[in-house]
Image (cartoon, helix red, strand yellow):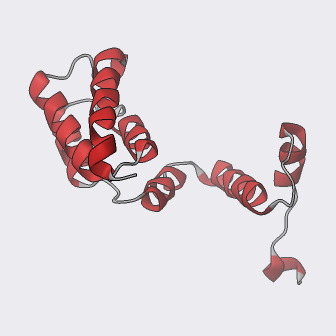
Amino acid sequence: LQSKTIDPDIRVYIRDSLDSRDEFRAFTKEIKSEIEETLVTGSQGMFRWVDCLLRILETCMAPDDVKAALKELPKDLDSVYARILESIDGMQRIYIQRAMHWLTFSAQPLTLSQLAEAVRIEYDVDKYGE
């Protein structure tokens, strides 16, 4: 689908999010408008990109924080996911990366209990060999 076809829907989603989420209620109309324009322009028709970035922007406490965050937005979903992973603390990051590997490369869908068991497995090739 072309971005121009989806942009109006993305705009509605952003406006609804800015109006309904508690984290954005204190922001001025100007800041909300800047968020909306920046996200619609950068979305390239990707709702997931917009949703992830709204979650990042929710953590901003002041208008200057929002403006700084808008200038440093990841350009694509891979960059968004990398940024999310980087924000996770040490050991948790290792387990989340393992979970992502299992979810990505599993030959069949995993149950939650199977995934929980799988992430505890240490499979470092450098440490144990192939």
Which residue shows up at 37% across the image and 42% down it? Answer: 50
Residue positioned 40% across, 52% down in the render = 1
User: Looking at the picture, how far across and down is residue 6, in whole percent?
Assistant: 33, 42
Q: From the viewer's perspective, tell me whether residue 125 is left or right of residue 100.
A: right
- Residue found 83% across the figure and 59% down from its top: 106
In the image, taking residue 4 as reference, residue 76 lies left or right, namely: right
Q: Quadrant of residue 122?
A: bottom right
From what the image shows, is residue 47 above or below residue 86? above
Q: Is residue 6 above or below residue 59?
A: below
Left or right: 130 in relation to 20: right
Residue at 26% over, 48% down: 4
Q: Is residue 49 above or below residue 64?
A: below
Residue 76 location, x and y as percent? Answer: 39, 59
Q: In which quarter of the image is the C terminus?
A: bottom right
Point out residue 37 in the picture as x, y percentages from the top left corner.
18, 40
Q: How many labels does the image show?
A: 0
As drawn, the residue found furthest toward the left would be 30
Q: In which quarter of the image is residue 11?
A: top left
**Residue 97 as seen in the image, left or right of residue 43:** right
